[in-house]
Image: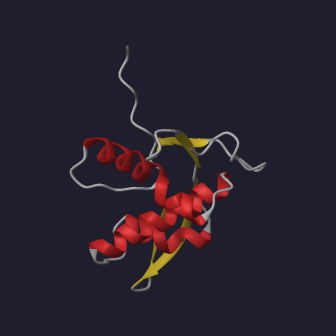
Amino acid sequence: MLDEKALRKSTFSEGYRVTLADGQSYCLPKPKIRFKPRVVDGKVEVAGGPSFGPEFDEQLDVLFGVVDVPPIERLRVKFEMAVRLLSANYDLKPEDFGELIVLEPDDQASDERWEQLTRAIMGIAPKPSPAT
């Protein structure tokens, strides 16, 4: 089993915690808010929102539905974002990602993990836990 704390890079950045398929809680960096102008039909609009840097803008446009793509491409982009964000905080081998980032449709635990991961990738704060 992987050791989440031992795999942290020296550049580890606190962010959103997600429970991955091995049952451990991993941390994805938080996005920054980034705005930019977009010119549409000669009119300037405000574009932007959560961003992990300009190199991720196209992927976030896919996830937020700005760009229309088939569902399998949206899933591929989520996997890509998860791999890249985990790689920013952890020293993982390529085969580790297949053990950590797993989607099993119609499995409640998998659905919950995937929702946590999707929210973190899209820069949406985690849902509050119920009080005990």
Q: Please give left or right for residue 115 compared with residue 37 in the image.
A: left
Name the residue at the front extreme. 1
Decide if residue 50 is in sight here: no
Q: In the displayed structure, would residue 69 be above or below residue 104? A: below
Please, is residue 106 above or below residue 83 in the view?
above
127 in relation to 8, above or below = above
Q: Nearer the viewer, residue 20 or 78?
A: 20
**The N terminus appears in which quarter of the rendering?**
top right
In this view, the residue farthest toward the right is 10
Provide residue 93's location: percent of width, then percent of height. Answer: 63, 61
The count of marks equals 0
Q: Position of residue 34 (x, y in %)?
A: 57, 60
Viewer-proximal residue, 33 or 41?
A: 33
Image side of residue 24 versus residue 88, left or right: left
What residue sits 52% from the left and 59% below the top? 97
Residue at coordinates 67% horizontally, 39% vertically from top-left? 5
Give the image quarter of residue 85.
bottom right
Q: Residue furthest bottom?
A: 41
**Where does the image place residue 74, in percent across and percent down from the top left?**
35, 70
Residue at the extreme left: 106
Q: Is residue 110 left or right of residue 51?
A: left
Q: Position of residue 72 (x, y in %)?
A: 31, 73
- In this picture the colour scheme is secondary structure
Residue at 64 percent of width and 57 percent of height: 92
Q: Could you tell me which quadrant the C terminus lies in?
A: top left
Does residue 20 appear anywhere in the picture?
A: yes
**Front in this rendered view, residue 126 or 37:** 126
